[in-house]
Image (cartoon, rainbow, N blue to C red):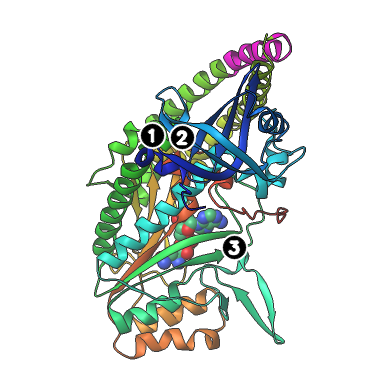
Amino acid sequence: MKYRTEICNLADHVGQEVTLCGWVYNTRFSGKIGFVIVRDGSGLCQCVMEKNEQTAEMFAAAKHLGQESALEVRGTVNREERSVGGFELKVADLKAVHEAVDYPITPKAHGIDFLMKHRHLWFRSRRQHVLLRMRATLIDSIRSYFNDNGYVLIDTPIFSGAAGEGTSTLFGVDYFGEPAYLAQTGQLHVEAACMAHGKVYCFGPTFRAEKSKTRRHLTEFWMVEPEIAFASLNDVIAMAEDFICSIVERVLGKHREDLEFLERDLAPLEAIRKPFVRLTYSEAAEMLRGPEARALLEKDLADKTAAIKELGHKIEEYDENATTARKKWQQEKAAQQAVDARMELAELEEQVENIPHHMELAANFEWGTDLGGSDETIISRLHDRPVFVTHYPSDVKAFYMRVDRDNNKLVENFDMLAPEGFGEIIGGSAREEDYDILLSRIQAHNLPIDSYEWYLDLRRYGSVPHGGFGLGVERTLAWLCGLRHIRETIPYPRMMGKIYP
Ligand code: 4AD
């Protein structure tokens, strides 16, 4: 393996002989020429074989290699603009490492349930490959931001003795006979470390027993939570703004081609710039009830109804091509297009069905209730930049949020809504620093004081104004990649009723 090269490095080896180790992505043979597209995790490369007296045996063997067979190919690298990745390998030798038979995910059409059950293999498909690489970049850019700006990483526990975010979504565990929970947030524990280090963050998996299946909710998701001492609500919002600009810039910088492959419209991401929009909850409520929101949804209804009609025609066309196209690959492509279009159609139909309900919810939005998913979508679609919605009614928010000293019905919190209807990706607040107020909030939420004594200690000894937020990795990635559903943004999505593989 002296000359083993990764496909992403082929540019450095033009004219040289190299060995690639990878898997069969696709093959095409006609007469005396064969094409084996190899993927090695770093890219795709078309390997070209010519049949002659010396290569006849290898040619015949290669012809029988099934999709996802593992192999080693030796050959000479040529620049070839028309080929996937821009290079080709002229094959001198090809050896199978393992022959795969009947790989279940074929270029044929598959629905989402089938693909989810084959998540362990679906990783190898190009789109999934791109998404998980982008996830890795996003996580790296998050860590870099905090590491470069003087925040100390604090790992908070996953076994937790108390609720952080309301008791309705707790996963209980039996902790040697004592009740415990999987962490819904690292925030309370990271606040303690904040009083030691000044600026900290925790980053890990968090768990919520979300009992409804929605496109935005997982039961296990990753959250980064920075926390700053001596900070006001405005300080935290300003940091969130700077942080978002930084990660968008880094992801965009590294993954422009991938985003194009995903057919993500880049213009809205390129437009992400400070300052973002700031609205109070009361202003957002007003907006939901107003004419702009109504007009938006009416237009939506008309546009989506038209799109459904058009999609219906397209599906007929794809179905027709799936049986009558001249080439087999054209039939397979049409079959997949039909499956995708049907999925899109089902989603559109569901959306259209829901629009009247969402209109009603928005028009009758009552001050004092939390913003629902559809309300967030409306607010975020009415702006072309991220929106901070601040100062929610205290009754609908967590116990630790700082009570607004000018209006004690409100808390000093914010949600950040991503644009284009993606909705909330950040939730944060100033924390209540006053011992007596915090104690009364814990009592008002019927939480067991004993479990929070340690947290109250932070208000007994050197309490200071402080605050922070939590950003969900999966929702952020869904926004950046333009995915309506969160399920493809994490390697193994966990949702109600879904735990395999
Ligand atoms: O608004 P949340 O619940 O805030 C907290 O947990 C605070 N303790 C954070 C803090 O101030 N340190 O959640 C924060 C973010 C949401 O905006 C969303 O991006 C994500 O976490 N999130 C979820 N993502 C996927 N599935 C779920 N079920 C999620 N719940 C929250």
**Circles 1 and 2: CB distance less than 8 Å?**
yes
Q: Which label was assigned to residue 76?
A: 2
Q: Within 10 angstroms of label 2, few (less than 14), some, or many (20 or more) residues?
A: some
Residue 144 spot, x, y in % from top left = 32, 61
**Circles 3 and 1: CB distance less than 8 Å?**
no
Q: Which label was assigned to residue 208?
A: 3
Residue 278 spot, x, y in % from top left = 28, 48
Residue 177 spot, x, y in % from top left = 72, 87
**Residue under label 1:** 15
Question: In this orientation, which residue lies closer to the viewer: 200 or 306?
Answer: 200
Q: Main secondary structure of the magenta part?
A: helix
Residue projecting furthest to the right? 102
* Type of amino acid at the residue the image marks with label 2: Thr
Disc on the earlier residue, 2 or 3 = 2
Q: CA distance from mark 2 to mark 3?
A: 53 Å
Residue 414 spot, x, y in % from top left = 36, 57
Disc on the earlier residue, 3 or 1 = 1
SS class of the residue under badge 1? loop
Disc on the earlier residue, 1 or 2 = 1
* Type of amino acid at the residue the image marks with label 3: Arg
Q: Nearer the viewer, mark 3 or mark 1?
A: 1
- Side of 333 relative to 203 (left or right): right
SS class of the residue under badge 2? strand
Residue lying at 57% horizontally and 32% vertically, measured from the top left: 37
Against 291, is 321 above or below? Answer: above
Residue 368 in magenta stretch: no
Mark 3 C-beta to ligand 1 under 8 Å: yes
* Range drawn in magenta: 308-324
Residue 321 in magenta stretch: yes
* Type of amino acid at the residue the image marks with label 1: Gly
